[in-house]
Structures are given as structure tokens and as C-alpha cells.
Image (cartoon, rainbow, N blue to C red):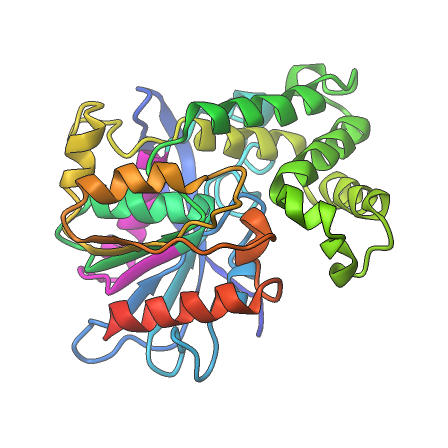
Amino acid sequence: MKSTFKTFQLGEVPLLSGETLLNAQISYKTHGQLNKNRDNVIVLPTFYTGTHQRNEGFFGLGRAIDPNKHFIICPNLMGNGISSSPSNSPSPQDGPRFPLMQMWDNIFCQHKLLVDHLGIDQIALVAGWSMAGCQAYQWAAQYPNMVNAILPFCASAKTSPHNFVFLEGVKAALCADSNWNNGNYTSPPIAGLKAFGRVYAGWAFSQTFYRNGLYKELGYESTEDLLNDWAIDHAEGWDANNLLAKLATWQAGDISAGPIYNNDFAKALAGINARAILMPCTQDLYFPPEDNVFEARHMPNADLRAYNSPWGHCAANPGNDAGFTAQLEANIRELLH
């Protein structure tokens, strides 16, 4: 598939923090066509280290999400280097001066893209992995009358304290690089980015994954090979300020933040009208299923379907766990039926 994308200029966007994002833009990719009834829209937000291109592993011809049947919209998360980000924003919001973009702000921008630019007022499904799943919860809470169904997998509606602490660890590893210079670096903090990737790898998979040597199924001869690959990927593939901007979004994740629910989390969950299937992985170290148990109890139309996989958080990565993918496909078909 071609990875070309389009960009919608948002202008000045008021943020939940009270700041204003200047010269805001949201980039996106669509697949398929909007039908006559305008009821075949599927939104697939992007995850932490993903872009619209990485989402192409979650749909295809003959699959549950099919571009021959559905109009698929993949909006890029603010901070990922394609939509407004520290790396592409002009002064005075460049680099470390880029403002905090909370989940509320991201979905506000995505809503403007769909409604003001694409002329869409109804979404059949919002689905996504990890931070993309967190955005699915946010969509359903923020615009409850617009979203028919959500399927967040390996995600949560509110970032847990343990998840927050994990993110502090990878952030500290990056910022310890002397080249970091509080985000005002003249050359990339390569050592910090590599340390970030190595720490991240320890959490992306489960203890069982490493104990049973499943990394060999990915082509690695040893854990050191995997760690080096993750280090190089983060050093060569990502801007440090962009990673930290998205990390701040992740840490602030809470669907009850904002003027609708005023930090009443149970009320926010109860306000989700959409049909929902919550699909955690039981061995996920970022988003353990206990968070989703609480969510399902307070959401009026939610079904909790945990999947046990030694691949942990990365069970959802296309190609890793065929059983997870099969269950995900079945759940999507059910919600779209």
C-alpha cells in the first residue's frame, strides 16, 4: 500500500491545559470509500511508536476491516513527527517548547478532521492497539453520540500509576544523555535514545517470552540481539522531543479529564454509550487486565475478553501471535455485524 498521506490545517487549537497550539495540523491516511449511507467509517488512531503506515497491518481485503467495505481513517497522533510535533513546529513551540497534548486535545483535533473536513458525523468503530486504544476510549467518552462501537486492545481508559512509573524510567534513561540538554540538543542524544529502546524492550514482552526464548521466532539469536535492535530502532527512527511529547500524552491519559466529567472516572466510563469489547493481554506489562475489569464494570455496554499470550503487549503487533489476531478479527466482525 502507498504510504502517502494528507494534512488538514487546524489553525489555532485551544488545549485542555489552557495553552493554545499554534499552526496546528493533523495528518491522516484514508483507505476505501465512504458509502451512500455514510455509516461505514472506521477510525484507527496511531499508537506510541506508530504512524498511519503501521496501521496497515490491522486491515486488508477479506479481513474484518476491509477497504472494499469500509472507509478507514488513520489519523496520526500529535507528536509523532507527521502531525504537529516538536520536530516540525515553528518557534515558539518547537522542540521542548511544544505544549502538552492530552488525549482530549488529540480527539478534539481528530473530531474537527472528521466533521469539518471530511463531513462525517457517525463512526461505526474506533479501534486500536496501546495508545491507539486509549484514543478509542477517549473518542467514545468525549463524543458519545458519534461513536457506535469501540475495540481497544492492550490499552486502558486511564493510565495507571504503575504504567506512569514505567514511563518515568524510559524518560530518565533518555534524558540522562548529556547531549539531551533539556531538549535543546544540536545533535540527537543517541546514547539516550538507545538506552530508551533497551529499557522499553524489557516491558514490551512478557517474562515468559524471554524465559522461553520466543525472541528467536523474531529472528534474534539472543536477548542482546533484540536489545540492540530496539536501541538502534529508537536512535535512528525517532526524534527525542517527539518521543517525550507522546510520552507526556500517555502519562496524562484519563478519559475523565476535561469539562464533561471533571475527573470523575466512573462517570466518564458510564458515559460511554458505544458497544465495546475490551481486549487486554493477560501478560501485558503496560496495560494489565485488572484496569479493564474496573472499566467493564462501569461501562454500560462493555464485554471484557482477555487473551492470554506470552508475547505480552506485543501480542497485538501483526504477525506475532496468530491466535490473538484471530480473536481480534472475530471481535471486530461481531461489533460491525
Query: Could you tell me what secondary structure mostly forms the magenta stretch?
Result: helix
Query: Percent x, y for residue 184?
Result: 68, 19
Q: Residue at x 72, y 56 (%)?
A: 214
Q: Which quarter of the image is occupied by the C terminus?
A: bottom left
Point out residue 294 in the picture as x, y percentages from the top left corner: 27, 37
Residue 309 is covered by the magenta coloring: no
Residue 128 in the image: x percent, y percent?
42, 54
Residue drawn at x 40%, y 78% as measured from the top left? 66
Quadrant of the image containing the N terminus: bottom right
Q: Is residue 120 magenta?
A: yes
Position of 165 with respect to 196 (left or right) is: left
Q: Taking 136 as reference, is 240 left or right?
A: right
Tell me the residue at 38%/63% (across/down).
Answer: 73
Q: Nearer the viewer, residue 312 or 5?
A: 312
Identify the residue at horizontal 38%, vertical 31% (top origin): 102
Q: Nearer the viewer, residue 149 or 73?
A: 149
Q: Is residue 244 above or below residue 175?
A: below
What's the magenta region?
Answer: 103-127
The answer to whether one can see residue 108 in this image is no
Q: Residue 148 versus residue 105: which sits nearer the camera?
A: 148
| Frontmost residue, 140 versus 209 | 209
Instruction: Determine if residue 35 is in view.
Output: yes
Decide if residue 107 is on the left or right side of residue 270: right
Rendering coords of residue 121 (x, y %): 18, 59
